[in-house]
Image (spheres, rainbow, N blue to C red):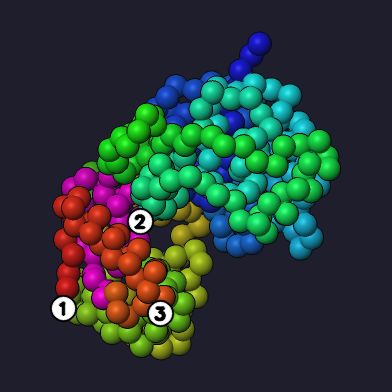
Amino acid sequence: MKKYNLHIARSPLQLINIFEAIETMELSNNILIVIERASVENNNQIKEVLKQIDYEWDKVFNIEKTSNSNFLDYIKMIKQINKFEYNYIFTGDIDSISNIIVANVKYEKVFLVDDGTSTLKRHEALLEKKVLKFKDKIKLLRFKLFGLKSHADYKINFFTFFDIKQKADETIVKNEFKSLKKRFNLSTNKSEKVYILGQPIYNKEISEEAFIQHLEKLLNYYDGKEIIYILHRYEKLTPDIETLLEGKATLYRSEYPIELDFLIKQEYPQHLTGFFSTALYTLKQMFIESDVKLFYIDKNEFFNPDRAEVVENYYDFFQENGFDIIKG
């Protein structure tokens, strides 16, 4: 019986990494499931990635985000995909929908693809027993009414650009961005511009006042250089932040994930900076000659102590991997 590989994407970076897995692991007979999020920007970037990296999928399922529940769409889709058998399943999320999909198809291995530094947290928790919350159990029971399994235990393997060490018997395949490098020649057109990767953390994770102070330090550090502020796809600048950037940096919002944007423009960024964006890590893997600097935000400035510890661990990870952390 012909076997397929099943790919579940909910963000543009997940989709890029899925393409990388297909290239690296030489996979054929691939089926794609795109599950849209509430963000229009997120969904538009997924569409742009699909346009730029033209690939002939065996089948494509698209679950559009609507104001109503997508429950029946999931039921219909799962009943179609469980007619096939799969070698591998690739997903960027380990959530209820991914779990239901995995529970209702035959497969050999499940791989997590990167969607930020959450991979590191997932790998750290690899040996921990997963326990469903009561409200999640109740939510999943509706699938049983349609003859579907609502949950299954399974082992997670990793297709990742992070350097993680094996903890148990999980499979770890390194993502070296072979597909992007093959499709887009890395240009020798090196840019002296300074690219700041924006993060929508102000008034959410830290105060706007604190963010402005840190952004001002960053801008002063690169004073005299041409600075481009790349807005995150979820980012909406406040008037005060716009005022700070005015005359000091050019605002840029890409229709593509930033990892793809530089390749399409055939531009080799030599100076990349920001706070703790995962994209700083991925871009360094692609543009190894780039000078990448992170500006430190003290954990005491975060509203949520748990989030503060997570971010502190991010900085430790970056430092362990040879990145410059600018403090003070």
Q: Is residue 295 magenta?
A: yes
Q: What residue sits 83% from the left and 43% below the top?
A: 145
Cα–Cα gap, marks 2 and 1: 22 Å
Counting residues from the start of the chain, the first of labels 2 and 3 encountered is 2
SS at circle 3: loop
> Which image quarter is the N terminus in?
top right
Question: Which of the 4 image quarters holds residue 56?
Answer: top right
Q: What residue sits 33% from the left and 49% below the top?
A: 282
Amino acid type of disc 2? Thr
Q: Which residues fall within the magenta stretch?
A: 273-298
* Residue 204: % across, % down: 46, 77
Residue 123 vs residue 200, the one in the foreground: 123
* Residue 188: % across, % down: 23, 44
Q: What residue sits 45% from the left and 41% below the top?
A: 113
Q: In this view, does 222 lie above or below 61?
A: below
Amino acid type of disc 3? Phe
Instruction: Examine the rendering and report whether any part of residue 240 can be seen.
Output: yes
Disc 2 packing (10 Å; few <14; some 14–19; many ≥20):
some
Amino acid type of disc 1? Gly
Relative to 129, 140 lies left or right:
right
Instruction: Examine the rendering and report whether any part of residue 229 can be seen.
Output: no
| Cβ atoms at labels 3 and 1 below 8 Å apart | no
Counting residues from the start of the chain, the first of labels 2 and 1 encountered is 2
Residue at mark 1:
328
* Residue 304: % across, % down: 41, 75
Cα–Cα gap, marks 2 and 3: 21 Å
Disc 3 packing (10 Å; few <14; some 14–19; many ≥20):
some
Residue at mark 2:
278
Residue at mark 3:
303
Residue 297 vs residue 257, the one in the foreground: 297
Cα–Cα gap, marks 3 and 1: 20 Å
